[in-house]
Amino acid sequence: QRGFGSMLSIQTGGGAARALDVIRRLKVWVPATSLGGVESTLERRRRFATESRTVPTDLLRLSVGIESVEDLWADLDAALRAAHR
C-alpha cells in the first residue's frame, strides 16, 4: 500500500431500501459498524431511531482499505447499477 486510505460518503437514491439493496450486492466491500480496519468497509447511516433525521436514509459511508482500487470501483459500480434497475 502507498499513501493513505480515505473515507467518503455517497447517497444511493431511493431511501433505505435502495441503500440496503446496494449493500447486499457488494462482494468486495464489507459491511461493518466500525470503519477502522485494513479492508474496505461501509456502513449505512441512520439505522436507528436515535439518529438525527437530517441524515439521509440512503447515506453510505465508505472506508477505503488496501484492496485493488479497480476491484473496489468495479464492485461498487456493479452494485449501484444493479440496484438502480
Image: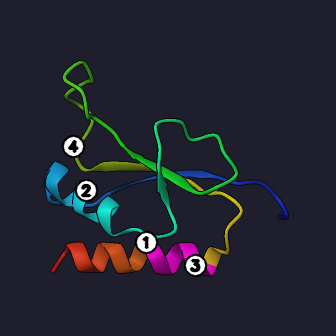
Q: Quadrant of residue 45?
A: top left
For this orientation, the residue located farthest to the right is: 2
Alpha carbons under labels 2 and 3: distance apart: 20 Å
Q: Is residue 41 left or right of residue 47?
A: right
Marks 4 and 2: in contact by CB < 8 Å?
yes
Alpha carbons under labels 2 and 4: distance apart: 8 Å
Position in image of residue 80 (x %, y %): 31, 73
Label 3 sits on a secondary structure element that is helix
Alpha carbons under labels 1 and 4: distance apart: 18 Å
Label 1 or label 4, whichever comes before in sequence order = 4
Label 3 or label 4, whichever comes before in sequence order = 4
Marks 3 and 1: in contact by CB < 8 Å?
no
Q: Which residue is mark 3?
A: 71
**Residue type at tag 3:** Asp
Task: Identify the magenta region.
Answer: 70-75
Q: Is residue 27 above or below residue 74?
A: above
